Image (cartoon, rainbow, N blue to C red):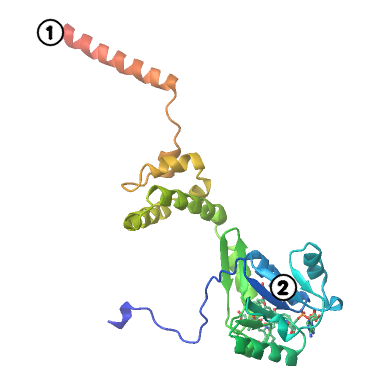
Amino acid sequence: MSSEFSTIQPGGSLILAWRIQGKKVLVIGGGAVASGRINHVLNADGIPIVVSPEKGLCKEVEFRIHEKQVEWRNREFSPEDVTDDIAMVLSAVDDPSLSTQIYQLCQSKRIPINAADIPPECDFYFGAEIREGPLQIMVSTNGKGPKLATIIRNHIRDNLPDGVSPAITQTGLLRQKLRELAPTPEMGRKRMRWMIRLCEKWTLNELGSLKEEHMDKLLCHFPSSVPTYKELTRPPPSAFANCIWATTILLTGGLVFAKYWKQR
Ligand SMILES: C[C@@]1(CC(=O)O)C2=NC(=C\c3[nH]c(c(CCC(=O)O)c3CC(=O)O)Cc3[nH]c(c(CC(=O)O)c3CCC(=O)O)/C=C3\N/C(=C\2)[C@@H](CCC(=O)O)[C@]3(C)CC(=O)O)/[C@H]1CCC(=O)O
Ligand SMILES: NC(=O)c1ccc[n+]([C@@H]2O[C@H](COP(=O)([O-])OP(=O)(O)OC[C@H]3O[C@@H](n4cnc5c(N)ncnc54)[C@H](O)[C@@H]3O)[C@@H](O)[C@H]2O)c1
């Protein structure tokens, strides 16, 4: 009986895709680690606010400030930086006692915090990431071996099949069109069943090569069938080819009729 269900493995982390679009993320520190954190926030369309004295900035953080990709407070951290509209705090300072103060303040305000390299002061850990367009993969060893997380990430990245990113992008476009075609919740099951069949039938390269003009043609098959990529993209017979076919059929018909007539 129990073998039917998945085995619980306690001790892991809850790995989620956190949506921080348009939300403020306080980054304390301006060194190499802060720079990596800022990039993660920007790649997720979050709004980084950086607190660090100028002398502590690394080249990349200077660049982000110069490009106005981040808001910068040129001073040491102050508790007033942790305002109620801050969605998340990322501490990357080289001062353990300051880090602990920041952690305690965030706990009291119930704002999630990551203090780089200090597991007891982390509500969440960072991981080694792969980013290819809409695809994101995160490897976590749950604090056991960060360098191993990097090595495993590199192995996965080097072995990803070709064409994952365009396949996901085009599938996203098609799903959008499908939702417009069959918008009601009642159509949900049909939509999902059809998408599953398509994703299973087509290769990643085929999905990635799906042009917008073919999408409309493909959606004509919803919900009853899923054509193969070849069937869908086969060019329609030309007028010349049609003419040849018609002539062949007429000639063959004529010959058969003549033979029959002769026999009578
Ligand atoms: C994955 C990555 C993401 C990122 O930070 O962006 C990340 N660390 C990375 C690199 C790295 N960090 C360290 C080394 C030296 C070699 C080594 O120790 O292995 C290297 C390798 C290097 O520098 O090449 C030292 C280290 N790290 C932590 C401690 C404290 C401790 O263990 O107690 C110590 C000091 C240990 C000591 O004093 O000995 C703790 C954490 N580091 C984490 C994440 C979280 C757990 C992630 C997980 O286990 O999956 C966690 C818990 C908290 C956090 O910071 O979020 C990033 C790779 C990014 C990439 O490859 O893209
Ligand atoms: N998780 C990881 O991948 C990883 C890797 C290396 C280091 N670390 C840890 O992250 C921390 C930062 O590493 P780094 O290499 O960026 O260090 P760094 O020395 O380059 O940067 C420290 C930053 O903290 C800022 N700072 C110090 N006191 C401050 C204050 N009172 N207010 C505001 N800013 C202040 C400095 O201005 C500087 O920008 C270190 O504690 C290190 O142990 C984590």
Would you call the spot at circle 2 few (<14 residues within 10 Å), some (14-19), or many (20 or more)? many
**Which of the pair 95/6 is nearer the observer?**
95
Residue 138 appears in which quarter of the rendering? bottom right
x then y, percent, for residue 21 = 60, 66
Mark before the other along the chain sequence, 1 or 2: 2
The amino acid type, in three-letter code, at marker 1 is Arg
Indicate whether 19 appears above or below 5.
Answer: above
- Report whether residue 134 is seen: yes
- Report whether residue 230 is seen: no
Instruction: Give the residue drawn at x 60%, y 60%.
Output: 132
Q: Residue furthest left?
A: 264
Indicate whether 70 appears above or below 199.
Answer: below
**Which of the pair 249/44 is nearer the observer?**
44
Callout in the foreground (1, 2): 2
The amino acid type, in three-letter code, at marker 2 is Ile
Per the image, label 2 sits on a secondary structure element best described as: strand
Locate the N terminus by quadrant. Answer: bottom left
- Confirm or deny contact between disc 1 and disc 2 (CB under 8 A): no
**Which of the pair 173/52 is nearer the observer?**
52
Instruction: Give the residue drawn at x 65%, y 72%.
Output: 24
Residue that carries the numbered disc 1 in the rendered image:
264
Per the image, label 1 sits on a secondary structure element best described as: loop
Would you call the spot at circle 1 few (<14 residues within 10 Å), some (14-19), or many (20 or more)? few
Q: How many marks?
A: 2
Which mark is on residue 32? none
x then y, percent, for residue 160 = 56, 61
Residue that carries the numbered disc 2 in the rendered image:
49
x then y, percent, for residue 27 = 71, 77
